[in-house]
Amino acid sequence: MNESTSIALSARQISKIVDGPDGCLTLLDGITLDVVRAESLAIVGASGSGKTTLLGLLAGLDRPSGGSITLAGTCLDALDEEARARLRRRLVGFVFQSFHLLPALNAQENVMLPLELEGRRDARERADDALARVGLSARCHHYPHQLSGGEQQRVALARAFVHGPEILFADEPTGNLDERTGAAIGDLLFALNREHATTLILVTHDRALAARCARHLRLHEGRIA
Amino acid sequence: MKPLAFAARSLRREFRHAEMMTLAAALMLAVAALTAVATLASRVERALIASAAELIGGDLGVNANRPLPAAFADEAHTLGLATSVVADFSSMAFTGEQSKLCEVRAGDPAFPLRGTLTTIDAQGREQPVHAPSAGTIYADHAVFVALGVSIGARVQLGGGEFTLAGEIGKTPDSGNPFRLAPRVLMNLADAQASGMLAVGSRVRYRLLVAGEERAVTAFAAWVKPHLPAGVEILTAQDAQQNLRGAFERGESFLRLTALLAALLSGVAVALAAQRFARRKVEEIALLRCLGANRAEILIVLLLELALLALPACIAGVALGLGLQQVVLGMAEDLLPGTAPRLTFAPPLTAFVVGFAVLLGFALPPLLRLRDVAPMRVFRHDVGARVRRFDALYLLPLAVGAVLIAFGAGNLRLAATLGAGFVGVGALTFVLGLALLALVRMAAARLRGTWRFGLANLARRRALSLVQAGALALSLTALALLGVIGPSLLERWRADLPPDTPNWFLINLQTEQLDALGERLHALRATNLNTLPLAVGKLVAINGRTPKPEDYPDRRAATWINGETRLSWSAQLPAANKLLQGRWFDGRDTQPALSVDRMWSDMFHLKLGDTLTLKIGEQDITATIISIRDVDWDSFRANFFLMLDPATGANLPHSHVASFHLDGDASTPLAALSRDYPNLSLIDLNALLDRIRDIVNRVTQAITWVLGFSLLAGVLVLLAALAATADERRFEAALLRTLGAHRAQLTVAVLTEFCALGLLSGMIAVAGSAALGGALAHGVFHMSGYTPPLAPLAGIVALAAAIVACAGWLGTLRIARSAPIAVLRRG
């Protein structure tokens, strides 16, 4: 495997500038990084350092003000939101701090979502398997408000991995959980990551969780420290 | 905490949020719709009443059987009103050998104060005039024919001789089709001088007043306690029986449109407030956590609401007034005469109703915020569950019911609308549950992205039901306004078909019937209807002499003191409907009677009661065997009392005929009148034209009001749909994050909203068709009305399209903004 084919994600000189009440505000400035396949990268830094903004740009959820991002060999610069969505559906999984489960859907239906978007006929069966893998077989038909925070995040993990993404983006996955539950979720996240050989890009304040990643990227005021 | 300052600061920040804009916009729209509709309705109504004033020759009349005390006219002058006095009596007109009994109206030079009196000169030119000058008279064409004279001839009337100065063209108060003789108009001073108004003559006097509305009202208030016995007030509204129906229907239509606009707005306000309350939960939890008590929280919420409502309601009033002015400007010929000036009552009422709508529909979710637990700051799931039933949610129902009760101004309209909307709500719940269950089953078996949309609908059962209910109610209101209303108006117009009888013949003798029938046939008369006519006096009800004071309905006195006309027929006449009992079938051995509903209500009559009537020299005591509903707008010869034919045939009687003749029939009918000098020929064309004119004006006015309410309804409908847009935007953003492409989102959203639109559209069509039938039958008294099913079916398609478009537009923004921005807002 040569270097170019082993690169899962590449960012060159990316910046993000937004309009604020006192003029332009630079959130990110000159970020350059490469992440190889199956690597785990923790993005750390103080609050407001631009971690989540960077994650959003790397995942193609937003456009940078400058610079270039290549995801699984596809340059995002020229892609419109429509094309980026297609790319995300095929290659990317997400885990959020606030879980972001749809409250009207039960656990099984939430996990089915990415498969349904792909039009998979076996969505229900695969969702059941994914829920079994995270230990929630018995909670398939429970709605988010009937689940604890840890259980909701396990459903979110099942949803993130159910369609076999190449890259998983996780934004403070343990941020809303107690230490013990957070640790259990961390274990599950890394176990699934290993099983699926997924590239993991993680934003966290949790030092223990960050310590489990192969590489760290520290941000300070929008720049790599 | 300073509640006002806190509420103001909070509102300033909140206003950036969409639901506050929606709430303010919905409120502004509600008040604008109410102001525009109520102001327009009030101005149109007052203009129509003013036009009705033309019918009595003034804004208000005081009728008496002797000259009224001077104090009446003095009071009117003090109030700044113009006055006029007329006297009505019968007299014979002579010229040479010819004579004719005439109904004479003697008027002072000011007559008429309102409306138009015209004469036709020898050259056939019509010109507006006032009461004739001294020494001259005007007369109906029938007088010219009967006396064989032309304009300029000298005619003897009472004790004097007068010059026939013109033929009467149009005249106010021309609407009594059963006038027994043609009219003559003369100068009041001449009538007094020639002794025609001497004591002992049967003269009816009328003092007419006209002027500022406020002064007329004040005069009416002054007159009421000063009324001597036998004196009554005649208002524009009750001037003519035939026109009253037209006014009442017009008023009901106008009230209906304003009411529906208010209810539609209530739905939008309720949805926006729900959304506002959901978002406020975290803030309230924090305030509670920091030590704010429930009362403080409630005060702050109410102040915030009031600070939002005040400018919104003011802006709504301004917008509404502007809009109604535009509508009036665009329809200058809509109102007879100049538009009545603006009054403060409708905008003020709209302002108050706006606040009532806000409080009634927005308070329940906000009041529930008092119960937010401080623990929610730490755990979002605390108190997140919604109670299944909350008595607070009865508040909007109560406000809706009060709005309907007061706004309808008609108990039957209020009950029909109230029952209709409750029915639509119940139908939505039952049908919605069943259809959602079906959708759920179907969606589980189907594939593709539209399956996702359908599943979404079924999965969010409660929300879908609430939305379908709100949409069904809005669409029902829209269907009522857009389809049912116009079709009812069309049906109303058709109540006066082209072959409506426009001529009456009275005093027709039995032996003349056949020959006259042939003459009329030769003239191509259509819709000929002949009935016998006897004149009697009511002398006893169930053996007791009736007294006017025993009956609250003041019209009873007219029948007790005056004469009544009655008829008989083997078949139930057209335009009559049996309500109780049976029609005469020849089995009756004793005199039997059928009475009109108005009579049975007025005299508290029921089947089996007896009426004693003095007819000629006979006293007939007849038992009531049926009660009828008579369509008095049909322009046929109709009677309050109908006897059994066997009894009737032995009574002294003449006949009355009604028929329709196209075009100018004056020449052939003049010949007819000459050949049968005993006949009185009555021309109903002027009255028919007047009624058609009024119906047309009312329908035009209502179409404008309908159009505006319809627009308000569509805007409120869109606002209602936008109330759930946040949740959908978040879902769409999440789906985008997970890789859904635009087409998938669009298909899912369109499928979901189309299904929602179809469901609510079908319920709305069923509801509005049923309500339309009930309104036509129960409120507007139209028989044989069928709701137009084809346009209603169009409403279903339109509903699906509008709802789908609104849903699609709501999620369109997400395609333009980065999903992460939405997800971060959470």
Image: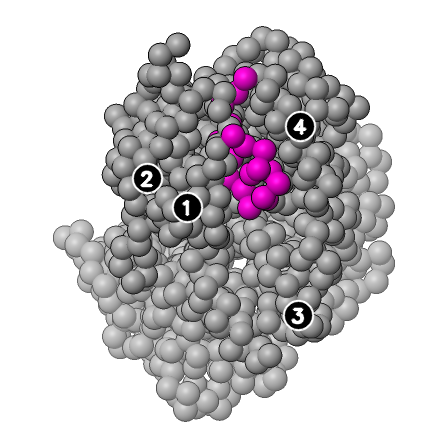
Q: Is residue A195 above or below residue B814?
A: above
Q: Alpha-carbon distance for marks 2 and 1?
A: 9 Å
The answer to whether mark 3 and mark 4 are in CB contact below 8 A is no
State the quadrant of the N terminus of chain B: bottom right
- Residue A219's label in the rendered image is 1
Secondary structure at badge 1 equals: strand
In three-dimensional space, the C-alpha distance between marks 4 and 1, rounded to whole angstroms, equals: 26 Å
Please identify, in this view, whether the residue under mark 4 or under mark 1 is nearer the observer.
Answer: 1
What chain is tagged by disc 2?
A: A
Residue B66 seen anywhere in this rendered image of the structure: no
Q: Which span is picked out in magenta?
A: A197-214
Percent of width and height locating residue A164: 54, 16
- Amino acid type, label 4: Leu
Comparing marks 3 and 4, which lies closer to the viewer?
A: 4
Q: Percent from the top left, x then y, of residue B113?
A: 34, 72
Q: Chain of mark 3?
A: B
Residues tagged 2 and 1 counted as in contact (Cβ below 8 A) = yes
The subunit letter for the residue under badge 4 reads A
Badge 2: residue crowd in 10 Å (few <14, some 14–19, many ≥20): some
Residue A31: which numbered mark, if any?
A: 2
Q: Mark 3, mark 1: which one is toward the viewer?
A: 1
Residues flagged by tags 3 and 1 on a common chain: no
The residue that disc 3 covers is B290
CB within 8 Å, label 4 to label 1: no
Q: Could you tell which of marks 4 and 1 lies nearer the N-terminus?
A: 4
Q: Which residue is mark 4?
A: A188
Q: Amino acid at mark 3?
A: Leu
The residue at the far left in this view is B123
Reply above or below: B624 against A129: below
Provide residue A155's location: percent of width, then percent of height. Answer: 66, 29
**Element on which disc 4 rests:** helix
